[in-house]
Amino acid sequence: MSTEVAAPVSRKTYDEVMVPTYAPSAMVPVRALGLDLWDQEGKRYLDFTSGIAVTSLGHSHPDVVDALVKQAHTLWHCSNIYTNEPVLRLGRALTEATFADRAFFCNSGAEANEAAFKLARKYGHEKFGANKSRIISCLNSFHGRTLFTVTVGGTPKYTEGFAPLPQAIEHIAFNDIDAARAAIGDDVCAVVVEPVQGEGGVTPARVEYLQALRELCDATGALLIFDEVQCGMGRTGSLFAYMGYGVTPDILTSAKALGNGYPIGAMLTTNTVAASFAPGSHGTTYGGNPLASAVSLAVLETINTPEFLARVTAASALFVEQLEAIVRDYPQVFSTVRGKGLMQGLVMAEATRGRAKEITKIAEDHGLMLLIAGMDVIRLLPALVVSDAQIVEACTILRRAVDLFLKPA
């Protein structure tokens, strides 16, 4: 064993050795437990980001740690030439818990969506012919960073400089039924929507909108895809958001909280749709490996109980109540609260548009980790195991941050 001491690293090291795809915070997290996190200086933070809706059971959840350690001592990887017991258990658990008959596992939300879009086109071609290939998505949506998924996403800044882009993809206004009716014709193979837009501003879909999409897809033979990468796995109070809406998709994608921080993604679908994929149609080296599958099954079994989901609903009620009080007390800063479950956004008022990040930076300086969704929305995504006391603490720190934001320079 080497006795050589590793050279220290810091935020400065990022600028020296990393490709500049991000501009991370000045503080560097080093350990965490539950919703508590500590940086290199030993400062404690209350994490209301969950790693962008990932660590929904909190950091280092004991059941998840146990599942990982047990599997790490058993079998790590065996390639897609073979299957393995953990992935079979996970596939069975997810299909038994949802509308789906079949599961495909990969490593991220982008990969899950890539698989969904490829499957939709393959299904359209096989069932209706090559002309049925157009994909309808929503403005301000986000579906990943591969060239295909970033093009399906409705945010132009993410595609700048990457042309030529995949073709036959159209974007319509979110929650606009008339726009959907105008766009969804017989050449559409898939309509993809986030039941709650995350990156696009923490905006929930209206029930009537999702019902209309379902009806239009049924009428034209298009597949309805729900991207639940951010809003799924208990975040809205149901295991998946579609369950709360009462609208069932043909394909559902999941990731983020599915592994509580261990990389995994899933595409869930029906027997009929899955039949368009055959051996060799699609694949992934690491997808469904034993480590990820064992961790994900532990996460699923923890979240998918009536008691756990009822607690999410109760916590979200208190959370929204606290956030609405902040909006009432600071109308010059915030205009409204919007979201679903423990996925909430504080929308900036007209006078403070574009300044959400200023408040999140002040909050971080005072020990509260928050996110933004665009420059006009503060995004709050606490772990689903958040306590009432932690909700109150977070909102107290947020109020302090707003007071400092309003203080004359």
Image (spheres, rainbow, N blue to C red):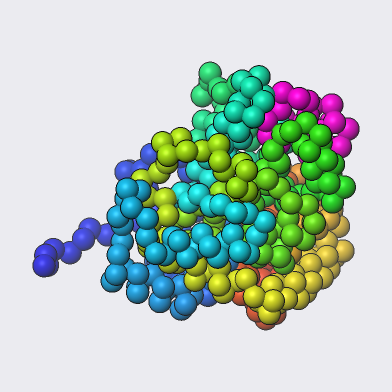
Residue 225 placement (x, y as % from top left): 67, 43
Magenta span includes 36: no
In this view of the protein, which residue sits in the foreground, 384 or 305? 305
Residue drawn at point x = 50 percent, y = 49 percent: 104
From where the camera sits, is residue 250 visible?
A: yes
Residue, x 22% and y 58% (percent of image)?
7
**Viewer-nearest residue: 367 or 122:** 122
Q: Is residue 147 above or below residue 165?
A: below
Q: Is residue 45 above or below residue 241?
A: below
**Residue drawn at point x = 83 percent, y = 46 percent:** 211
Q: Which residues are magenta?
A: 170-191
Quarter-of-image position of residue 221: top right
Residue 102, how many percent across, how many down? Answer: 56, 52
Q: Is residue 347 left or right of residue 85?
A: right
| In-image side of 117 versus 261 (left or right) | right
Quarter of the picture holding the N terminus: bottom left
Instruction: Judge whether residue 172 is colored magenta.
Output: yes
